Amino acid sequence: MSISSTSRSAAHILPVRFPSDLLRACQGTAGSACLDGLHVVLPVLFEAYPQGCGYGGLVVCPAVPSYLVNPVFESVSDRSVRKYRGDPVPLELVREVIDAATYAPSARRGEQWRFTVLSGEEKTRFIGFFRGELNKIAAERGYQALGSALNSCEIMDQAPISIVVWNAGERGWLTEEHSVAAAMQNMLLRATDLGLGSLWIGDVYSVYEGIRAYFKKHWKLSGAIALGYPAEAGRDFRRKTVDEVTEWMMKN
């Protein structure tokens, strides 16, 4: 889609300071955001702007980078949540989080991801098992051998939902594990989009075989995700810049 400069000048210009302002401006309107070069164009109802909106009911907003107005990329910054409220998470939201996982890329389209969702008494029972196994390890090798595992266990206990993630791939490829990791990332992004907090937990590896036996699974254990409404904002930290993590080999 393109809009002439004349059309742009006739359209309403919405003041936008942050991406979230732009998304809120779109709430209750007809259609979703789309891009017009460096401008963001939002289809809106004429009723919302009775004096007219210029080009066919389109509102042209100030130029902002496209990735900043995409709700997926607004969610991409890691905000791992380690404290949760006790409010139950509706099942339909949990299903939406898992549905997002199913859109991840996978090795040879194998869709290797599998999930075990725990809440209520089932979660309490599993957390009791997990904590008990960790305490056995501590008794034999000392608590320093656990690293952050006990703390992760307590976070899983606090969050209303725990999701154990499995790799059901049968080829033994490393890319099968990559596929499951991509699915987990999708879940964290969707959780943020739904107003939920989440935490990717790798410490379940401390009881790898024990957890497989507990659930009677022959699949590989990939990790777990704690899910719930955050009691505090996730912590951020300085990220390496693009140039710090990238090797550019671009000579012609």
Image (cartoon, rainbow, N blue to C red):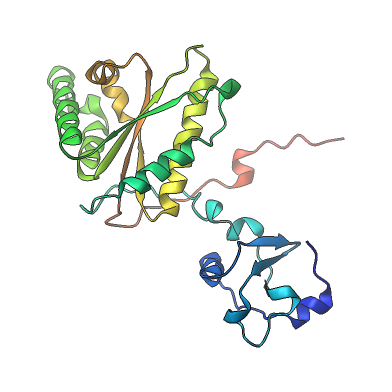
Judging depth in this view, the residue of 227 and 49 nearest the camera is 49
To which quarter of the image does residue 221 belong?
top left
Seen at 58% across and 47% down, the residue is: 241
Seen at 28% across and 37% down, the residue is: 162
Which quadrant of the rendered structure holds the C terminus? Answer: top right
To which quarter of the image does residue 137 belong?
top left
Q: How many marks?
A: 0
Residue at the extreme top: 171
Seen at 83% across and 79% down, the residue is: 6
Residue at the extreme right: 252
Rendered position, 21 above or below 98:
below
Looking at the picture, how far across and down is residue 52, in whole percent?
68, 84
Which quadrant of the rendered structure holds the N terminus? Answer: bottom right
Q: Is residue 203 left or right of residue 129?
A: right
Looking at the picture, how far across and down is residue 79, in whole percent?
41, 50
Q: Is residue 32 left or right of residue 213?
A: right
Looking at the picture, how far across and down is residue 200, in whole percent?
37, 38
Q: Is residue 20 left or right of residue 54?
A: left
Rendered position, 198 above or below 168:
below
To which quarter of the image does residue 10 belong?
bottom right
Looking at the picture, how far across and down is residue 118, in whole percent?
25, 35
Seen at 25% across and 45% down, the residue is: 159
Rendered position, 167 above or below 23:
above
